[in-house]
Image (spheres, helix red, strand yellow):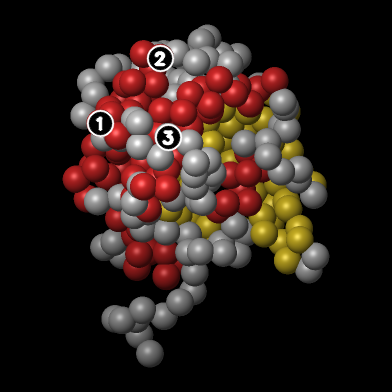
Amino acid sequence: MGTGGPAGPATEPAGPAIETHGLRKVFGAIAAVDGIDISFPAGRIYGLLGPNGSGKTTLIRLMAGLAVATSGSVTVLGTRMPSRPLLARIGYMTQSDGLYSELSVWENLSFFAAMSGQPDVTAMAEILDVVELGDRRGRPILQLSGGMRRRLSLACALVHRPTVVFLDEPTVGVDPVLRYHLWDHFRRLATAGTTLVVSSHVMDEGDRCDELVLIRSGRVLAMGNGAEIRRQAGTADLESAFLKLSGVPTRGDSQ
C-alpha cells in the first residue's frame, strides 16, 4: 500500500461542508428522497446506511450536484448545488464502474485526472498504490476483474485530491484485507480535512464512520454514531437497530 499522505484541502468558508434543507426528489409517484435535513461539518466520515432502494444513491447525486432537487436545497462548501465550477473539488464514485473498457488503467486514470484539471502524475501513482493497482497500470480494463474495476473507479474519484468525496458502495466486491486498507485511507483523508460521504448496505461498516444516517424509503430513521444509534434502538448491533427503527419485528421481540 502507498504511504503518501493526502494533501490538505484549501481553507473553506465557515459553516458545514455539506448541508441540506427539506431536500426532496420525486420520480412520478415515488419520493426517492423525502424531506431530508442534514448538516455535516468538514473533516469527518459520514455513512449513509440503508437497504437497496432506500434513496442513498439519489441523495448522493443531489449532494454532488448531479441531480436537481424537486424541492429543498443542498449547499456544499458554502455553494448552492448544483454548481459546475465546484465539481472540480468534488470526488464521486458511482455504484456502476464508469470506465472506458478499451483504455488501460493508467489511461483511464489520466483521463479522469485531466477532466478534474489536475493531471498530477505523482498523485496518480500514489492512488494506484493505495488501491493496489500500481503493477497493472498498462492493463486494459477488459482484462480486469470486477473487484479491480471497483478499485480503479475509487482511484478515479480520488486522484484529483478533492475536498469533498461521495462514495456510493465503494467496497462492494473488494476483499476483506483491501477493504481494511481502504477504510484506513479514508480515515487519513478525513484527518487531513477531507469530508467523505460513504453509502453502504453493509451495516458493520457503520462503526468505521464518525456519524451515520440511517435511511429507508427516502427518509431519515436515525442519525448519530454507531453507539448512539444502538443505544437509541436498545440493540447490540446496527443491523438489529436498523430493523427495530424501521418497525420490522426481530427475534426476541415480544409477540
Q: How far apart are marks 2 and 3 (CA)?
A: 15 Å
Q: Is residue 15 above or below residue 136?
A: above
Q: Distance between the residues labelled 2 and 1?
A: 15 Å
Amino acid carrying label 2: it is Val
Which residue is depicted at the point 50% across and 15% down?
119
- Circle 3 sits in a helix, a strand or a loop, which is it? loop
- Mark found first going from the N terminus, 2 or 1: 2
Q: Helix, strand or loop at disc 2? A: helix
Q: Nearer the viewer, residue 20 or 123?
A: 123
Q: Residue 121 carries which label?
A: 2
* Residue 44 horizontal side relative to residue 17, left or right: left
Figure quadrant of the C terminus: bottom left
Badge 2 local density, few (<14 within 10 Å), some, or many (20+)? few
Residue at 48% x, 32% y is 108
Residue 166 lies, in percent from the top left, at: 51, 38
Location of mark 1 (residue) = 135
Residue 129 showing in the rendered view: yes
225 vs 249: above or below: above
Residue 166 seen in the current view: no
> Residue 33's quadrant in the figure?
bottom right
Identify the residue under disc 3: 104
Looking at the image, is 42 positioned above or below residue 213? above
Quadrant in the rendering for residue 76: top right
